[in-house]
Amino acid sequence: MKTVQKIIMAGALVLALTTNVFAQINTNLQFTAVTVTDEHAIRLTWASTNSELYQIQFANALATNTDGTTAWQTLYDNYPSQGTNTFVGDFGNYILAPAVVHPKNSSMRFYRILDQGQDSLASDEPIVSIISPTNGSAAVGELTINVVASTDQPILSGTKLYVDGQEMQMADSITNYTVGSTNYEMDTYSINTCEWGNETHTLFATAENESGYGDVIGSGPVSSGHGVSPFVPVLFSNLVTRISFSQPSFDPSSGQTQQVSAVFANNSDWTLNIVDVYSNVVQTASGSGTSMFYNWDGTSNGTNLPNGIYYYYINAETNGESSDAMLSGGSSSLARSSAVRSESPELWAVAPDSENVVPFAIYPPGFDTNSLTVFRATPSEVESLTASSSRSESSVAMDSGGSFSPDASGGGSSAGSQGSPATPLRPPSNPMRGFAGTFGVAYDTYTANGTNPVHCAILVDGLGAGGHISMQGNSASTQQPFGPLPQYKREVNNFISQMQHWGWNNSFLKVDDQLNINDLRGSGTPFNNANIGVLFTHGCYGTTLDYTANGCKQMYFPITSGGGAQYLRLSEMNLGGSGTNGLKWMALNSCRSLYQANWNSMKNAGIKPYNGNLHLLMGENTDGYTSSSFGWYWAKYINFGTGTNAASFSPLAIRTAWYQAAYDAYHNVPFAGGTTINYAVAGDNACHDDTLQTNSAPGGSWFYETKQVYPLLQ
């Protein structure tokens, strides 16, 4: 467990474009700059030390606790040093649970930075770099970003992409491979540059490596290291800019609307198409001006629509009107200004192999402009030059079935027109209308003793002769050690962010000592009040009979309390909830949580951890291993499918997604030779092929199946 060594603190008045450092603690760790961006986000820069990790905390008010102290909340955790100076952007953090709102929605914001100490693998941190785009390049529309990381440690646990210090969603695709003794990962991200302003933005990536897995009984502590890529400045240059949304997701049934807004580089005629997952246009709005605001009530011209995923396509074409034209009242009507635009000649530039004409002034000082074609012209002359080609391009293609696709240019931009990609991609934006359902999560990191394991109290076998239960063949009279699993925090956050992205409401999150063993016993468990439940813990199986549960062999989960732990029997669970918000699907993300031999033993003894309401129970037949991407994959696959764009919506069956997510998380990981990982699903026969969208009521007869997910999906 890292100790807090140093603290710095600052206060920020957000809505006024000024920020003041009000306190400074410890002169060895200090802010070097605190600024407010033009979208009212906060950028913090502080003097930092190589290989240190930092936690960025915030509060919207000071002295909020009854004892006069401040209730600080975490914005980012384990944030690695970028060198002698480190910066982070506070744009809110909707990847966390509960989410942190954008600072523009708070009248005040106060910060403190905690130095969490040095990486435990400070001498062997991963190497990470952004290989595309390149330094100083320009980007239009959707930008693909490729990140490569490498390490000689056993585990490379993923990368993160940041834009201006704001963490993005996980990569669209993750590829692991090994060359000799070096493990590599190549991740591909995509962002919609139309959601930022036209200026130079800083991209960087981080990566984390680990010395081992730490999942099984008796495994030693896991050391970790963090690497940061060099900064890559990229110029975003769009006609359609600053696309944003008023709600992370919105619920029309409670009276909420979703305000879609955008800014245009020039006065433009614009069209907004709202599209469902089947590419049908459900709502259209249009207007003119230098900006747009449209409040969508979640209907299609007054007709209610189902909750679900919707995408927003904004198409714009310059119209030669004054840039002073404004949108009236947030509607699509236009109030035109009589102001006359200046027609003074300006410098314009065209990049090689491009037809885009952009103001020369957008290139920052020091940018290599030798390859550009530069000319002088008035804005009208430039518009005349581009109008014939831009106005001939169709902004939207719709067929008689109401389907929709972006323009043939793939959403590209020119000086005169642009069709944006399917927004939104940038957190905190979310394409959801309404809520898909509820989910609950609990996890245990076993970190109460720092890097030392937590020992679990021995369990009596219930026979009455003073015997104890042997765990996986180990001594029955010896407390078994369970090593720290801080990796769960990242895995859980990725799962939660993906579930929330698809419109699911996180009804509870219990971590470490917040999770009481009694929370998991009986039908009163909070899991039974959520549609989906996920438990992340260590797990093991008994190799002697447990007479407390009808003399069968079963599975056990060590649940911590302070620096110790006690076993939870699988038989003590009573999973399944009735009604709209009742538990239908439960995942036990723990080693041996559905160990086949012991599952059969429980079944033969008439012992079951579920009731008549549960549809499916997911788990692991063998030892499993932590993976930053597994939960993210599973959440994506059950909500959307394995595709990568808005046109590939095809959710997988819940059990199929369980296996596929494990395979995709593990299949290129260089486990030790002979390692085999099998996942398992047990469930009601009537619910075998349940999807989130279409599922059946339980019929009372259960099945069990197991599939190998490493090294092959079978």
Image (cartoon, helix red, strand yellow):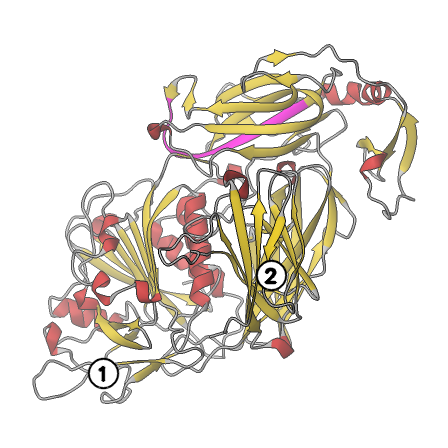
The quarter of the displayed image where residue 32 is located: bottom right
Q: Which mark is residue 24?
A: 2
Q: Position of residue 229 (x, y in %)?
A: 68, 62
Tell us which disc is closer to us: 2 or 1: 2
Residue located 58% across and 64% down the image:
25
Q: In terms of secondary structure, where does tag 2 sit?
A: loop
Left or right: where 461 falls relative to 530: left
The quarter of the displayed image where residue 46 is located: bottom right
Q: Amino acid at mark 1?
A: Ile
Left or right: where 489 falls relative to 241: left
Say if the magenta span includes residue 556: no
Q: Which mark is residue 172?
A: none
N-term mark: 2 or 1:
2
Residue located 14% across and 81% down the image:
461
Instruction: Give whichever of 642, 217 is nearer the camera.
Output: 217
Residue sitting farthest toward the left: 464
Q: Report the residue marked by disc 1.
A: 458
In the displayed structure, 614 sits above or below 451; it is above
Badge 1 crowding class, 10 Å Cα cut-off, few under 14, some 14 to 19, many 20 or more, is: some
Q: Amino acid at mark 2?
A: Gln
In the displayed structure, 481 sits above or below 684; it is below
Q: In terms of secondary structure, where does tag 1 sit?
A: loop
Q: Position of residue 323 (x, y in %)?
A: 73, 20
Q: How far apart in space, not on screen, are marks 2 and 1 (Cα)?
A: 49 Å
The majority secondary structure of the magenta stretch comes to strand
Instruction: Give whichever of 249, 703 is nearer the camera.
Output: 249
Left or right: where 175 falls relative to 458: right
In the displayed structure, 170 sits above or below 199; it is below
Left or right: where 638 falls relative to 204: left
Q: Can residue 402 be seen at all in this image of the molecule?
A: no
The magenta span reads 304-316
